[in-house]
Amino acid sequence: MALKIVKGSIDRMFDKNLQDLVRGIRNHKEDEAKYISTCIDEIKQELKQDNIAVKANAVCKLTYLQMLGYDVSWAAFNIVEVMSSSKFTYKRIGYLAASQCFHESTDVIMLTTNQIRKDLSSPNQYDTGVALTGLSCFVTPDLARDLANDIMTLMSHTKPYIRKKAVLIMYKVFLKYPESLRPAFPRLKEKLEDPDPGVQSAAVNVICELARRNPKNYLSLAPLFFKLMTSSTNNWVLIKIIKLFGALTPLEPRLGKKLIEPLTNLIHSTSAMSLLYECVNTVYIDVNTPPLPSLSLSLCLYLSLPPQLCVQKLRILIEDSDQNLKYLGLLAMSKILKTHPKSVQSHKDLILQCLDDKDESIRLRALDLLYGMVSKKNLMEIVKKLMLHVDKAEGTTYRDELLTKIIDICSQSNYQYITNFEWYISILVELTRLEGTRHGHLIASQMLDVAIRVKAIRGFAVAQMATLLDNAHLLTGNMQRMGICEVLYAAAWICGEFSEHLENPMQTLEAMLRPKVATLPGHIQAVYVQNAAKLFATVLKSQEGNTDSTAAQETSQLMIDRLPLFVQSANLEVQERASCILQLVKYIQKLQQKDVEVAEEVSALFAGELNPVAPKAQKKVPVPEGLDLDSWINEPPSESESEDEQPKAIFAKEEPKHSRPRREEVDEKELAKRREARKQEQANNPFYIKASPSSQKVYQEAPGVEHIPVVQIDLSVPLKVPGLPMSDQYVKLEEERRQKERAEKKKKEKKKRKEKRSGRGKKHDSGPESEEDITPAHQVDIVTEEMPEKSSKHKKKKQKKEKEEKEKKKKKKHHHHHHHSDGGGEEAVQNGTVEEEEPLPVSVFFCFLPLTKVYDIQGNLQDGSQVVVSVIFENKCDSFLKSMEFNVLDSLNSKLQRPEGSGPHDGLTVPFQLPPGVSNEARFVFTVQSIIMPQKLKGTLTFIVKDSSTHEKLDFKLHFTCTSYLITTPCYSDAFAKLLESGDLKCSSVRLEGVNMPFHHLLARICFHHHFSVVERIDSCASMYSRSIQGHHVCLLVKVSAQTVSIDAKCDEPTLLGNVLDEIKQTFSQC
Amino acid sequence: VQNTVQHVLLQAEDMQQQIIRETFHLVSKRDDNVCNFLEGGSLIGGSDYKLIYRHYATLYFVFCVDSSESELGILDLIQVFVETLDKCFENVCELDLIFHMDKVHYILQEVVMGGMVLETNMNEITTQVDVQNRMEKSEGGLSAAPARAVSAVKNMNLPEIPRNINIGDINIKVPSLSPF
């Protein structure tokens, strides 16, 4: 035996440690992979040894290799071994390795549950800390469920170091196991006021994260956070809280007003400022710069601080020489842009200036802002600038970003800002000359879209596309440009479809049939072939008019010569089309040789024009009778899917019976509301084609082509531009055109004035050029099914309507809000321990429910006879409630603890007032003599309603269950076994029938509702333990067979046991 | 996702090498006088995330965070982290980090836990790290003395021992950072 140990330590001497490994890797730069594979072999040997030190060393090295990108999942079991070492050194290595290598699908994680639980309750706080840290990285839903209770207990650990970690990890637990939120929340809230700043910060952190996902559930915490904000000096906490308020204020506008004062205090008071700067960033902010961006900006929006003011301050930031501030300024600006585009627009100069910044991050931010800044007036100028950047840009990422932004900006809201489409086409053509862009398809789709929808531009577009096709070799020259060849797709299609506009169709036809085309991607070739046929038809038509018939025959011959190349294509589509067309042309040639005129018939193949389809064409299809689009086809999904962590959601899930029937009696109002909601959703859903707001009318008759408005356009600019276009020249032309227009308008207006302007003339005075004055040179075919023609009158009406609707919406919102504050009464917040919503007396004065109360009773660990009851008061009426007094009729057994000197029947003043819609929590301490029986205490709450100044009274009952005297206490199987063997415990049992839930849910429910912890679980059998505040042991053995659950229980106090079992039974009878 | 604060070395899964490469590529080509924020990395998880980095001599410390974090705050956290490293390693240099990756992780774990900021007070962090290191020492450490001796002997023949080559000390220019 001794020999073996000696041998082990000698072996160890030759092991590499981490430093040796690193050194070795650095020395084997040339054959690193080989060296590492020998190292891995060594590690495998080391892992086979019994010595835990050797194993730990091996795992430590593996962790490093994992970081280098090597797969070490094969060692997962060894990692677990090292984790369970009793020495802190090894344990830490094990947990580090686990946090790096374990993930949800690692199956050994199941084995770790008990080890982690043991570590969590270790007397050494650092064992616990290491376990918590590790767990935070690899927690799974199973682990979260099994360990939630242990972690919850740790939240009240005596050491702040553990409390802090336990609080923080709860967020991870909530994510994995949302059901734990409900029971843990009161304690989490309590930690917001922890004496240790670290714990407090962690609690704020967690709640802010929760609130970010679902702010409205945390509105009730606003007063608490408000207090923290004014009292805390921890800047991390402050930043988090202010960010949280940023999310809350849109939900509760009154909050905004309240916040102004403390915020401005924070912003303006110099001492606070210097403190902020000092702490948050000494290097980056000097004291003269305006408020801390991260802190105050997100809020400025929602506060009644006028956005202009906020933007002004941002401007100072952006002009700062510090790049970080510049970046943050722009970031905040883009947030404001969403709500107040107008106030940002005036800083266009600044943002354009930022486009020239040397820093890409800043340029990207500025690009983002540009989108909301363009107008008809400045579009050309901005795009010109962007085009310059495109030429200068180095990285392809930035250039691609520029390209998409240019297209985004130009095409936004149906090309609203484009006044000259020739210019736009030339921009698109210029963009095709970009090296190596990925966005060829984007340019192509724009080309197609514009050519189809802007009829007047077709001639110009076709000429441009023909040039593109002619110079296709430039685009496909090298492989890098393959992305851009997508535009040839568009070019070929446009040339074919609108071939009547072609100057020289024969030349284009030849260009499309070049052998080089066969190197293009298949889908492009297919378009080439198809459109070559279209062109062929056009060419024939022009040639047959001539007396010389040989030209036409030569064209056919050209087709017959070139098409076989495509017939051999590997692409099925190309092959099929080519062979079909080839046969057709051969037949045509035969006819031609017989001097038959075929041109008419050939062009008939491609006759007819493609019209764009109205986005709302579907609407015109009448709904068949008897089809109700609003009725449910399947059972509706539960209403609260996205609100997993919302406490109410849990309740709803537990009692689905209550909410179902309500749904069946949906009335008209409800339907209308839903329809409205769906419309809202559709408006926000990019996959829905948007409807303009005045589309409520239903057309009875079937739609005809005549419904599609065709806009007549006369062009004020000559169309012919030889060669490839230069977009720049359009800027000049446009300028001239506008001037001309302005002059004309002036003339007209003068005339009008002479004729005495009628009251309806609403045109702006011809001073500086305004947005509406710029009429587009071309108009986009925006298909609305609304009106056969688009008269200006109609447009005005539309606008008016829109306005009205907006106003209505505003009102509705407002109204809705009110509803929210007084339409309460439906949610009884359930909690893990005891809960009961008070049956509220409906007094004459309160036909609405004024208050809800929810309470939670918890045993006090330190004192075996004290119970803390925390009561949440929620004001559900419209009035302010004050002077609340809480009083309970003491029983022999339980007494409310009153401050010294007050009589036994005096009430306790609730230390806060309740504005409408607000809830707050108060705690009351009770002294309890015997805990073996549940009991009910009667009590009253008196309060004054501010408006009517009347005293009101509310009766309630407090139900102290035996469960509430139990405290979750971990217990190990060995101790548990001893306890059972000791024979001091009395036995009792209970059977539950018809419990239909998975076993682990069942256990979780007992754990949460009745404060037990699982000691051991084998298949469908588990032992559980809990302790009362007076030290009674309660042991359960839970077995499940079919739908029957049998619980055998032992306790040193039979009455207590009987009551606890009754309560458990009740819990399950409710579900 | 929650406020993911990740040290570049802590990223998960097979993608991690690729992420690190891309991040390094993005960060290393930036000048010193541009801002410390970086968006648009295609691998880091969407537009809600951004990279926040600081550059010390030959080292980059990169955190990837979502919008729930304050940008300047994270810059400061990096500073706290680096200063903590400096304290714990006593004048930290690049080689310290290379050879003691495990220790770096232990320190980082006291600052960031499971992607959430745990502690921002440097004194608190160093105290906890120190206590744990002392515990390790009292247990005899991972490698007992003999193993050390052997590894020293083993290295004697190696051509290059980088122990004395000091590539770029980390310069810490911010001496007075008041605690949070």
Image (spheres, rainbow, N blue to C red):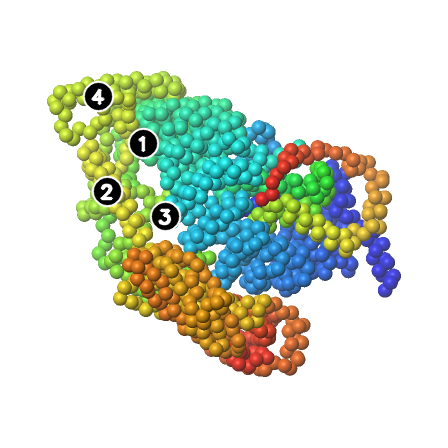
- How dense is the environment of label 3, judged by Cα within 10 Å: few (below 14), some, or many (20 and up)? few
Q: Image height check: is A386 above or below A103?
A: above
Q: Residue B72, located in which quarter of the rendered image?
A: top right
Question: Which amino acid type is shown beneath numbered disc 1?
Answer: Gln
Seen at 46% across and 57% down, the residue is A645
Q: Is residue A720 left or right of residue A217?
A: left
Q: Which mark is residue A416?
A: 1
Mark in front: 1 vs 3: 3
Mark in front: 3 vs 2: 3
Q: Is residue A859 left or right of residue A117?
A: left
Q: Image height check: is A699 above or below A495?
A: below
CB under 8 Å between discs 3 and 2? no
Seen at 78% across and 35% down, the residue is B164
Disc 3 secondary structure class: helix
Residue A667 on image: x %, y %: 26, 60
| Residue hosting label 3 | A254
Seen at 37% across and 36% down, the residue is A306
Chain under numbered label 2: A
Q: Are marks 4 and 3 on the same chain?
A: yes
Chain under numbered label 4: A
Q: Are marks 2 and 4 on the same chain?
A: yes
Marks 2 and 4, how far apart in space?
31 Å
Q: Residue A413, located in which quarter of the rendered image?
A: top left
CB under 8 Å between discs 2 and 4? no
Mark in front: 4 vs 3: 3
